[in-house]
Image: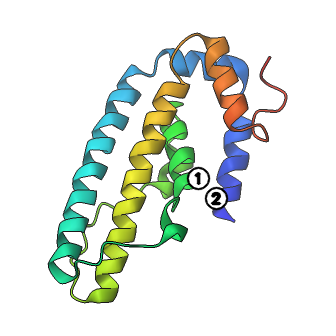
Amino acid sequence: MQFARTLSFLVAALVKTTVFAQVQSQEPRAVALRAEMREAEQLADALRASADMISKDMGIGTMFHEIDTPAHTCYTLGKLLGLDRAVQHLRFSRKPMAAHNEDEAHDARVKAQSMENFVTAAKASLSATAGSPRFQCNNWRYANPALARGWCW
């Protein structure tokens, strides 16, 4: 429910003039997001190392491949658009977890997959906001048709 409220807020906040002004001045935001990407990569490596010490069973199952992707996408786009307060509850947990048994090893691997999905979402968000305002708008519109109604060309 909170995720839906955040998406609704983002839709309300994303009007043409505001978005274009914010995206054009986003370089510090992009630098900060790249730092979070590096942090997520390091956390994923630490989680996998912790899990590997307990169990060499690397599989997490296909149902976890896209874990947290919508939340990460919403978070990264919100950060790039300067809507930090609206998306702060979607920020991934920075706490590394140490695996002590098989179940915790599996959980650590799932969390590591989530961190990889964060990096992928951040890369996609950075590329979606590159280029001209029309290019930015079209990328957002094609990626999020339900969110972009009424404010794109």
Residue at screen point 63% across, 23% down: 19
The x and y percentages for residue 75 are 51, 46
Mark 1: few, some, or many residues within 10 Å (few <14, many ≥20)? some
Q: Amino acid at mark 2?
A: Phe
Q: Is residue 134 visible?
A: yes
Which part of the image, by quadrant, shows the C terminus?
Answer: top right
Which part of the image, by quadrant, shows the N terminus?
Answer: bottom right
Residue at screen point 39% across, 69% down: 110
Q: Is residue 14 visible?
A: no
Most foreground residue, 5 or 36: 36
State how many labels appear: 2
Q: Is residue 119 above or below residue 67?
A: above
For the view shown, which residue lies furthest in the top direction?
132
Find the distance from the CA under tag 2 to the CA under tag 1: 9 Å
Most foreground residue, 44 or 9: 44
Mark 2: few, some, or many residues within 10 Å (few <14, many ≥20)? some
Residue at screen point 65% across, 51% down: 6
The x and y percentages for residue 21 are 58, 16
Kindly state the secondary structure of the residue where label 1 is placed: helix
| Residue to which mark 1 is pinned | 70
**Direction from residue 17 to residue 43 in the image, left or right:** left
**Tag of residue 3:** 2
N-terminal label among 2 and 1: 2
Q: Amino acid at mark 1?
A: Pro
Kindly state the secondary structure of the residue where label 2 is placed: helix
Q: Is residue 76 above or below residue 49?
A: above
Most foreground residue, 100 or 10: 100
Most foreground residue, 132 or 105: 105
For the view shown, which residue lies furthest in the right direction?
150
The x and y percentages for residue 88 are 48, 51
> CB of mark 2 within 8 Å of CB of mark 1?
yes
